[in-house]
Image: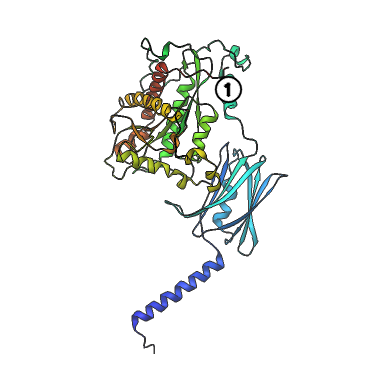
C-alpha cells in the first residue's frame, strides 16, 4: 500500500508523465505547426513553422538549379508532405518540391528551381502568433532592373508613335494623355490645381517619367492588423494601392507621363529597409506608404497622415504607431544578416538632406490629409511626425497614410467596400496631382 501523501503521489505522477512525453517528443521530433509558400517575382519564400526550433543544413546544386535542406530534429509528417501540393504553377522561382525521410530524425527537402537562385536559409524565434520558423528565401540570381522594367512597361502601353521612339536622356515631346480609368461610383478625379503666380509651377516642365512609389504595408508572413470581422490589413492596402496605380498610370503632369511602382504587388513580405531601397532604385519622386492599422480600443477611428521626424514624435499616439509599424520586420521575418547590411533602417544620424525631405513630405501630407478628410473623419487634423523606418529615404518626399482604423467595426466595414476603396484611391490621386501642380519634380535623366 502506497503510504505517501496524495499530493506527493500526484506530483510524482505528473513528473513521470512529463518525462514520458518528453521522451516521445525526442523520439518523434519537433511538431510541424504549418507550412507556407509565398511566391513573388523578386523572391519566393518557404516557411516551416514548428513547436520547437529546427536545425537546417542547406546545400545548393547549380545544374539543374535546386536547393536541398536537411532538417534535423523532425520526422516526415503529413504537414511537411503538404509542401509538395502548395507549389503554384505560376511561381516564378519554384518548379517543384520533394520531401522525404533521409535518416532517423532528418527530413530532406529538395526545392527544384526554374532559374539560378541565391538562397537564404535562416530561423526565427517565436513572435506574435507564430512559433519557431525555418525560412527558405529564394532570390533570382539575375533580378530585373526595376527602373528599366517601368520604362519598358510605359513604352509597351504608350501609343505606337511613342513606343517606337528610343529611350533617351534627351528632351522628348510630351506624351499624349492616357485614357482615364473609370472609377464609378466614386467621384471623378479632379484635374491638377492651377499654380499661383510666383511658385515652382512656373518652371519648365520635366521631360521624363514621373514615378510614384506606392508601398502597401505588411504582406506575406505579416498580415498587419486584423479587424473584428477578420479583415486583414495587408489585403485592403494592396487593393487600394493597385487601384491608385491604375489612376497614376493614366495621368500626366504638365504633359509628362506618370508611372506607379509598387514595393509589393502580391501577398509577400518586403522588409522595411528594402521598401526604402526599392523606391530609391527607381528614383521615385514620391513615396506613399498605405496602411489601415489597429488600436488598443475599437473606439479609435479616422484617417491620419505621418511624415518623418528628426527628433521626437509629435504625439504619444504617433510614437506608439511608429513603434508598432517598425516591428513589422520581426513578424514578417527578416534575415538578421541581411538586416545588418541595411543602412537605411539602421542609420540614426539624419544628414542635412533629410531636412528638405521632411519639409516636402509635410507639404505632401497636408494635401493628402485634406483630400482624405473629405471622405470621413480624421483622427488628427494635422500631419503627425514620428520615426517610421519606412520613411527614411533621404532624397524622396515620403508619407505614411493610415486610411482608417481596421479595429473599428464601422471603419472595417468601409475598408472592405469596393466603392470606398475606389474613393480612397481617388482621394490619394487628387492629393498627388495637387502636390505636383505646386511642386514639379526636378529634371532627371530618365526620359522616354
Q: Quadrant of residue 427?
A: top left
Question: Residue pushed farthest right?
Answer: 63
Q: Quadrant of residue 299?
A: top left
**Dot 1, how many residues are within 10 Å of its Cα: few (below 14), some (14-19), or many (20+)?**
some
x, y percentage for residue 268?
51, 40
Q: Nearer the viewer, residue 359 or 420?
A: 359
Residue at 55% of width from left, 10% of height from top?
173
Q: Residue furthest bottom?
A: 1
The picture places residue 208, in percent across and down from the top left corner, at 54, 17
Picture quadrant of residue 151: top right
Residue 53: x and y in percent read 52, 58
Residue 408 visible in this rendered orientation of the protein: no
Q: Residue at x 50, y 26 (%)?
A: 284
Compared across the picture, whether 274 is left or right of 376 comes to right
Which image quadrant: the C terminus?
A: top right
Instruction: In the displayed orientation, state which residue is furthest to the left.
Output: 299
Label 1 sits on residue: 151
Q: Quarter holding the N terminus?
A: bottom left
- 447 or 350, which is in the foreground? 350
Q: Circle 1 — which element?
A: helix
Relative to 397, residue 346 above or below: below
Amino acid at each position: 500500500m502506497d503510504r505517501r501523501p496524495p499530493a506527493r503521489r500526484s506530483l510524482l505522477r505528473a513528473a513521470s508523465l512529463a518525462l514520458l512525453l518528453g521522451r516521445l517528443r525526442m523520439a518523434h521530433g519537433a511538431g510541424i505547426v504549418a507550412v507556407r509558400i509565398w511566391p513573388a517575382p523578386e523572391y519566393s519564400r518557404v516557411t516551416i513553422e514548428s513547436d520547437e526550433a529546427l536545425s537546417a543544413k542547406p546545400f545548393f546544386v547549380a545544374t539543374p538549379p535546386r536547393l536541398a535542406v536537411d532538417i534535423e530534429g523532425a520526422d516526415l509528417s503529413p504537414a511537411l508532405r503538404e509542401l509538395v501540393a502548395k507549389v503554384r504553377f505560376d511561381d516564378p522561382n519554384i518548379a517543384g518540391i520533394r520531401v522525404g525521410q533521409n535518416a532517423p530524425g532528418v527530413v530532406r527537402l529538395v526545392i527544384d528551381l526554374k532559374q539560378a537562385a541565391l538562397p537564404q536559409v535562416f530561423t526565427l524565434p517565436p513572435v506574435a502568433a507564430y512559433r519557431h520558423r525555418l525560412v527558405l528565401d529564394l532570390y533570382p540570381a539575375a533580378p530585373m532592373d526595376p527602373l528599366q522594367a517601368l520604362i519598358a512597361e510605359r513604352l509597351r502601353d504608350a501609343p505606337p508613335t511613342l513606343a517606337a521612339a528610343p529611350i533617351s536622356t534627351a528632351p522628348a515631346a510630351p506624351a499624349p494623355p492616357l485614357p482615364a480609368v473609370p472609377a464609378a461610383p466614386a467621384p471623378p478625379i479632379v484635374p491638377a490645381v492651377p499654380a499661383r503666380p510666383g511658385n515652382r509651377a512656373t518652371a519648365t516642365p520635366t521631360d521624363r517619367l514621373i514615378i510614384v512609389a506606392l508601398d502597401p504595408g505588411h504582406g506575406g508572413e505579416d498580415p498587419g492588423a486584423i479587424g473584428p470581422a477578420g479583415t486583414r490589413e495587408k489585403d485592403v492596402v494592396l487593393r487600394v494601392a493597385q487601384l491608385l496605380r491604375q489612376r497614376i498610370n493614366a495621368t500626366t503632369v504638365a504633359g509628362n507621363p506618370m508611372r506607379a511602382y509598387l514595393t509589393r504587388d502580391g501577398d509577400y513580405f518586403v522588409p522595411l529597409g528594402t521598401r526604402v531601397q526599392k523606391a530609391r532604385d527607381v528614383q521615385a519622386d514620391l513615396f506613399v506608404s498605405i496602411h489601415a492599422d489597429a488600436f488598443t480600443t475599437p473606439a479609435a477611428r479616422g484617417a491620419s497622415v505621418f511624415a518623418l521626424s528628426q527628433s521626437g514624435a509629435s504625439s504619444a499616439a504617433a510614437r506608439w504607431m511608429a513603434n508598432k509599424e517598425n516591428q513589422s520586420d520581426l513578424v514578417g521575418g527578416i534575415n538578421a544578416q541581411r538586416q545588418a547590411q541595411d543602412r537605411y533602417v539602421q542609420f540614426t544620424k539624419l544628414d542635412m538632406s533629410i531636412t528638405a525631405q521632411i519639409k516636402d513630405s509635410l507639404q505632401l501630407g497636408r494635401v493628402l490629409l485634406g483630400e482624405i478628410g473629405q471622405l470621413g473623419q480624421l483622427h488628427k487634423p494635422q500631419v503627425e511626425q514620428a520615426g517610421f523606418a519606412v520613411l527614411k529615404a533621404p532624397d524622396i518626399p515620403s508619407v505614411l497614410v493610415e486610411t482608417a482604423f481596421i479595429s473599428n467595426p464601422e471603419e472595417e466595414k468601409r475598408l472592405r467596400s469596393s466603392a470606398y476603396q475606389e474613393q480612397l484611391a481617388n482621394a490619394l490621386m487628387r492629393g498627388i496631382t495637387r502636390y505636383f501642380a505646386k511642386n514639379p519634380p526636378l529634371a532627371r535623366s530618365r526620359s522616354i
